Image (cartoon, rainbow, N blue to C red):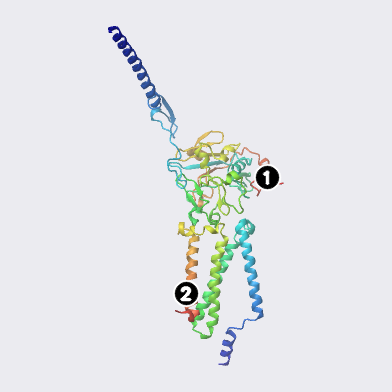
Amino acid sequence: MKEEHQESKRKFFELGIKFGLLATAGTVLASKVLDDGKTSSGVVELMSTDGTILHVPASEVKEVSLKPEGYNPRVGFPGKKFVMVVDLAKCKNALKCQNACNKGHYITGDNAWLKVYKMQESEKTSPFFMPTQCQHCDKPPCVKVCPVDATFKRQDGIVLIDNERCIGCRFCMAACPYSVRVFNWDEPDQPKEIQDKEYTPDYCGTPSVKGTVDKCDFCPHQIVKGELPFCVKACPNDTFAFGDANEDTVTNGSGQSFKLSKLLKDRAGHRLMEGLGTEPSVYYLPPVENIGDYEEGLKNFTEFESVHKETKS
Amino acid sequence: MKSYDKLVQDLAPKEFGKKGKIWIGFLLFVIFAALIAYSQQIRKGLSITHLNDYVLWGVYISNFVFFVAISLVGSLVTAILRLSGAKWSTPLTRISEVIAVAAIIMAGLTIIIDMGRPERIYNIFLHGRLQSPIIWDVLVISTYLFISLMLLFFHCFPILRF
């Protein structure tokens, strides 16, 4: 009787200790898993916009999503001001930008959103190529004349079109001094899966709507994915650089980053038709010491037919 | 006094003869053909008008300005003849005011024909913005149409007065 009692007592203690150990281990493990990232004592190195390296405890670093809860395509991404820099010295008229844009936005009309013009300032200076797309003006004339508020300016600097509201009066095309807007004269001949996509102004041209206006959308659909716009990525000569003016940085296709203000100052950056007061978001660097052979680029040049159409048999 | 009687005789409504019927038939044919053409434009898109040409892109708009001008001239003729107070001119004022009303209706229709998406015209009233000159057009034309109709009914056709 006494021995049995002793036995059960020992068993009780044994079990208790086992459970206790398990519970302690479990708590420690759970707290490790749950608090991961909060209590880790690592240090993250960050670079501020003026180039100084900052050490920030990893616990203080939080990833911020570009698309906040309740994102409205008419309002745009908070705290951003997107800009593009086009280095005219580097453009060889390879037209990779145009092809990538046409492909990415499923452009089926007659006119591409990105056009490359051949330019010559005067008889004595050398000719060069100039890619143009929507300049995303801070004071856009197209937005001012739209009768139904179908085209609008967002807080992140992008000018977009709501193709589900546009009445197709083409007044914005007449107002735009850069002639970058294109009209869908025909029923767009897009693939079936694109036509069935849900429409959003954020991804212009998917699907295109007959009888409305389209133009370069600065690729917010790519920015959300953390990628550069189609043209910037496709250019083999790093002609384009894209970035955020609030961060004062632009990045080109091969991943090099520049300080925007310094780049514009050093290379005498300017904007198109500055005298009109439209204040575009696209900056151009003058074509000094052109790297490309002008004659070579001329082979690709076409006055029209900026959208490659597959010949139907 | 003899020449005055002759003037009134000349301006008085004439009998609607065979020539007039042929003319009206021809005009109805033109209207019918235009309706077919417009239905094609709705179905296939504005590209069949070839307005994407750099020269022709503004043809509809110049047509609009043309109709507005005709309408204004019609009202001007009415006004001058009314103000001069000549009794004999009543048939002329009727003709010019009817032309003015018809032309301003046509001008409004031309703008709708020019639009790529005419079925969304209600957006002008839902989301209209006063800073756009297109809205000014809408305001001016509707006001002008209203005034023209008032002129037509209350001055040119006294019979229709309430």
Image location (x, y in percent) of residue A182? 58, 51
The image quadrant of residue A32 is top left
Drawn side of residue B30 relative to residue A6, left or right? right
Image location (x, y in percent) of residue A169? 54, 57
Of residues B135 and A32, which is closer to you in this image?
Answer: A32
For the N terminus of chain B, which image quadrant? bottom right
| Residue B29 visible within the image | yes
Q: Name the residue under label 2.
A: B150
Callout 1 environment at 10 Å: few (<14), some (14 to 19), or many (20+)? few
Mark 2–mark 1 Cα distance, whole angstroms, equals 58 Å
Amino acid type of the residue tagged 2 in the rendering: Met
For the C terminus of chain B, which image quadrant? bottom left
Image location (x, y in percent) of residue A174? 55, 56
Q: Is residue B78 above or below residue B57?
A: below
Q: Residue furthest bottom?
A: B1
The image quadrant of residue A21 is top left
| Residue B46 visible within the image | no
Amino acid type of the residue tagged 1 in the rendering: Glu
Q: What element carries label 1?
A: loop
Q: Which residue lies furthest to the left in this view?
A: A2
Callout 2 environment at 10 Å: few (<14), some (14 to 19), or many (20+)? few
Which mark is drawn over residue A310?
1
Q: Which chain contains the residue that carries disc 1? A: A
Q: Which residue lies furthest to the front in this view?
A: A1
Is disc 1 on the same chain as disc 2? no
